[in-house]
Image (tube, rainbow, N blue to C red):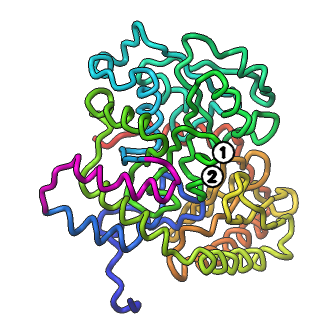
Amino acid sequence: MTDSQTPPDIRNSLGLRPVINVSGTMTSLGASIVVPEAVAAMSAILPQFVEINDLHKMASPVIARLTGGEAGFVTASCSAGISLAVAATMTGNDLAAIERLPDTTGLKNEIIIQTGHVVSYGAPVDQGIRLPGAKAVLIGQATSCYPYHLKGAINERTAAAVFVISHHTVQYGLIALKKFAEVCHARGVPVIVDAASEYDLKIFLAQGADIALYSSHKFLGGPTGGIVAGRKELVRNAFLQNMGIGRGMKLGKESILGTIAALEAWEKRDHIGIREKETGYLNLWKQTLTGRPGVTAEIEPDPTQNPLDRLRVSVDPQESHITAWDLADALARGDRPVIVRDHEAEHGYFYIDPCNLHPGEEKIVASRLDEELGKARASNEIISTPFEERYVRRIAGLMRWPD
């Protein structure tokens, strides 16, 4: 499609900011650009009536093929998948027990998770465990967990164990997935892996997970949804939770078919070509920042071994005249807002992620970096807002609601 044929940006007519996402596959920004195949499939099914369970059954072999599991289904989100999978390990296929949840009287209801994996993805991971009525049993310490912690926590009330793959988790000192699964399986405990934003769809089941959970709206480029994959019996029991707590986690025909289409498109995607394009973006941004007083830009690999790199931008406020978080906020303002990956900005750096750009946006990002750093350098004073005030502003923004 040429520029003259490009449809107008709907955000303008809705009064929404035309943000450029260099933060990554973040739900708060709409996660990812939905692939054309999924858009077409969703548009085609929306006017039609279908038997939803038959559509779910269509998804299962596609999910199995892509993940290496025995079966699968689509739910509202990866977070929903955690609750459904946990519920499945407690109730099995007992429909009466499924309807009673979150009352777990008479059921195994303890779910083990490493303390360093209890993070927030917009909500606490352990809340997803507790929603169906389970008790989260935290083992080890935030930066230290060993197999003996896991062995010591398993008892007659243990229903399952949850393992989280995320850049938010502690990346050292914890039990690796293979060993984690080995210890659990020796005691008959199934392992549920939250791999919401991970690129490799097969590795987690191959390393011992009984159920692996993915977001369909992140790297896959599908509609908002979650994918539950793994052992057939456990997947079926998780699907049966749609007759209970899963009712509020249902999704429409368009999301199921859109996820199927996104999975099939994933098989045909030019992954190497995409990486080469992203590397070009990273090099452009690094070149833009080279020689800037107080700014260091280094290309770094993804911490959970996804096959992509990001640009780490470190900012010395004494030389650049601005803090990392104030620079991030400045980039996010104006007519061309650029949203960076700023989870660790208080440490003096943020990341720029190249995986969610429309053609030409990489140049706008470079221009905005140049613009805001130039403004800061020209300032007679260092732009340094107390970091705590930034947090207060964000919470206040969440609390405001239209009249």
Q: Is residue 165 left or right of residue 321?
A: left
Q: Is residue 180 above or below residue 215?
A: above
- Please name the residue that numbered disc 1 is placed on: 207
- Give 298 or 142, whichever is nearer the viewer: 142
Asked if the residue under mark 1 is in contact with the one under mark 2, i.e. CB atoms within 8 Å, the reply is yes
Q: Is residue 65 left or right of residue 170?
A: left
Q: Quadrant of the N terminus?
A: bottom left
- Give 263 or 344, whichever is nearer the viewer: 263
| Residue 344 locus on image (x, y percent) | 72, 47
Q: Is residue 365 above or below residue 59?
A: below
Please give the name of the residue rendered at 32% of the width and 17% of the height, measured from the top-left corner: 97
Magenta span covers which residues? 48-70
Label 2: which secondary element:
helix
Does residue 393 appear in this view?
no
| Residue 162 locus on image (x, y percent) | 58, 31
Chief SS of the magenta region: helix
Please give the name of the residue rendered at 72% of the width and 14% of the height, measured from the top-left corner: 152
Q: Quadrant of the C terminus?
A: top left
Please give the name of the residue rendered at 64% of the width and 45% of the height, measured from the top-left corner: 166
- Give 170 or 49, whichever is nearer the viewer: 49
User: Badge 2: how crowded within 10 Å, few (<14), some, or many (20+)?
Assistant: some
Question: Does residue 310 belong to the magenta stretch?
Answer: no
Amino acid type for the residue under numbered disc 1: Gln
Amino acid type for the residue under numbered disc 2: Ile
Q: Is residue 276 above or below residue 402?
A: below
CA gap, disc 2 and disc 1: 6 Å
| Residue 47 locus on image (x, y percent) | 14, 63
Q: Which mark is residue 203?
A: 2
| Residue 146 locus on image (x, y percent) | 79, 26
The picture quadrant where one finds residue 9 is bottom left
Question: Does residue 52 belong to the magenta stretch?
Answer: yes
User: Badge 1: how crowded within 10 Å, few (<14), some, or many (20+)?
Assistant: some
